[in-house]
Image (cartoon, grey):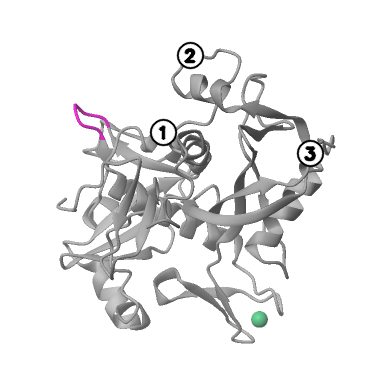
């Protein structure tokens, strides 16, 4: 396929709409035009999904089909390739250079694809190591959408069946006509620092690796701002109060459908009073100790890899570039 290359893990880029600086993480940078006008036309969607040039991502049990070769790639299937296979209703991802892109779930016990012997289903976390990041972002969109549809087959108002509309952006109740829009759950993820020290923790039950630490994170609750969510989560998990909370960057995180909102803030108290139910450990780490870990020179502290926004928040703090966006 002919799509623009975004083989970057994280970069600061100029927005095409102006001079706004945006930070781009893995799973963002989706090159598709999501076709807001087209997806409101049901006849168009039927035509597009039947078109011979349209391309489909295939998922099974939350995993995506890829082709193993000297240059592994996402497997883009045609409608013909899907013939004879039990699949979900396709969700419309968007348009690029007059080609329509969709995602579908294989809902057979077995997935028999002839002519794709080198293909296999893999977790999206592994995908980012091997494919173009534009395709990873399209895969993230497909996975999040398919998962949302599986969970929203019934109306939250009256309990009747819902049907897909607008190519998958919304489901409408067959009885009371209520609309349910595909949602993304907001998660704040924040690096909190005090001078040369920053706060990292281990979530209980997340990993058996006792050296693995990351920044704190939590869901934004109803009726609070991003800044308030940061302050509340840090207080709940660590008993530390924070001030001067600022936004850093964000990342779509399709596990299952989150938007990670990266922030940073200063601690206004340093005594830790940990939530033992949620957290295994929380500690202050010195900048030098973290710098050695990022260089692979510190066996006693394992940090998140470059796939995650957490890595870049930590790295930006160590390098003193957290404020880069403010100063532009
Ligand atoms: Zn209803």
SS for callout 2: loop
Q: Is mark 3 within 8 Å of ligand 1?
A: no
SS for callout 1: helix
The residue shown at (63%, 85%) is 175
For label 1, the crowd category at 10 Å Cα-Cα, with few meaning under 14, some 14 to 19 and many 20 or more, is: few
The quarter of the displayed image where residue 166 is located:
bottom left
Residue closer to the observer: 316 or 49: 316
Question: Does the magenta-highlighted stretch encompass residue 233?
Answer: no
Q: Taking the image as drawn, is residue 257 in sight? A: no
Q: Is mark 1 within 8 Å of ligand 1?
A: no
Q: Earlier in the sequence, mark 1 or mark 2?
A: 1
**CA gap, disc 3 and disc 2:** 29 Å
Q: Which mark is residue 297?
A: 2
The stretch in magenta equals 68-72
The residue shown at (27%, 43%) is 75
Task: Locate residue 237, reporting x and y percent.
Answer: 78, 42
Position of 207 with respect to 99 (left or right) is: right
Does 237 appear above or below 196?
below
Does 166 appear above or below 10?
below
**CA gap, disc 1 and disc 3:** 27 Å
The quadrant of the rendering that contains the C terminus is: bottom left
Q: Magenta part mainly helix, strand or loop?
A: loop
Task: Locate residue 288, reporting x and y percent.
Answer: 54, 22
Does 63 appear above or below 71?
below
Task: Locate residue 200, reporting x and y percent.
Answer: 66, 33
Question: Does the magenta-highlighted stretch encompass residue 69?
Answer: yes
Q: Which mark is residue 278?
A: 3
Label 1 sits on residue: 126
The reply to whether callout 3 and callout 2 are in contact (CB within 8 Å) is no
């Amino acid at each position: 396929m002919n799509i623009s290359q975004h083989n970057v893990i994280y970069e600061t880029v100029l927005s095409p709409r102006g001079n706004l600086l945006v930070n781009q993480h893995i799973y963002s940078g989706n090159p598709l035009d999501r076709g807001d006008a087209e997806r409101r036309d049901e006849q168009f969607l039927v035509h597009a999904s039947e078109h011979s040039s349209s391309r489909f991502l295939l998922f099974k049990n939350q995993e995506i089909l890829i082709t193993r070769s000297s240059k592994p790639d996402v497997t883009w299937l045609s409608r013909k390739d899907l013939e004879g296979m039990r699949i979900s209703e396709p969700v419309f991802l968007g348009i690029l250079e007059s080609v329509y892109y969709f995602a579908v779930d294989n809902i057979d016990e077995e997935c028999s694809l002839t002519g794709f012997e080198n293909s296999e289903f893999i977790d999206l976390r592994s995908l980012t190591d091997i494919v173009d990041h534009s395709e990873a972002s399209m895969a993230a969109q497909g996975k999040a959408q398919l998962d949302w549809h599986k969970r929203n087959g019934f109306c939250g108002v009256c309990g009747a069946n819902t049907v897909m509309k607008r190519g998958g952006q919304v489901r409408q109740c067959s009885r009371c006509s209520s609309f349910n829009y595909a949602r993304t759950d907001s998660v704040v993820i924040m690096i909190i620092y005090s001078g040369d020290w920053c706060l990292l923790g281990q979530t209980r039950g997340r990993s058996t690796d006792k050296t693995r630490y990351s920044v704190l994170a939590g869901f934004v609750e109803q009726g609070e701002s991003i800044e308030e969510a940061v302050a509340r989560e840090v207080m709940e998990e660590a008993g530390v109060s924070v001030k001067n909370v600022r936004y850093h960057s964000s990342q779509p995180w399709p596990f299952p459908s989150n938007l990670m909102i990266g922030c940073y803030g200063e601690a206004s108290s340093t005594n830790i009073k940990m939530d033992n139910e949620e957290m295994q450990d929380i500690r202050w780490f010195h900048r030098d100790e973290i710098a050695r870990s990022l260089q692979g020179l510190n066996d006693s502290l394992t940090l998140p890899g470059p796939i995650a926004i957490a890595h870049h928040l930590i790295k930006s703090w160590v390098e003193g570039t957290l404020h880069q966006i403010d100063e532009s």
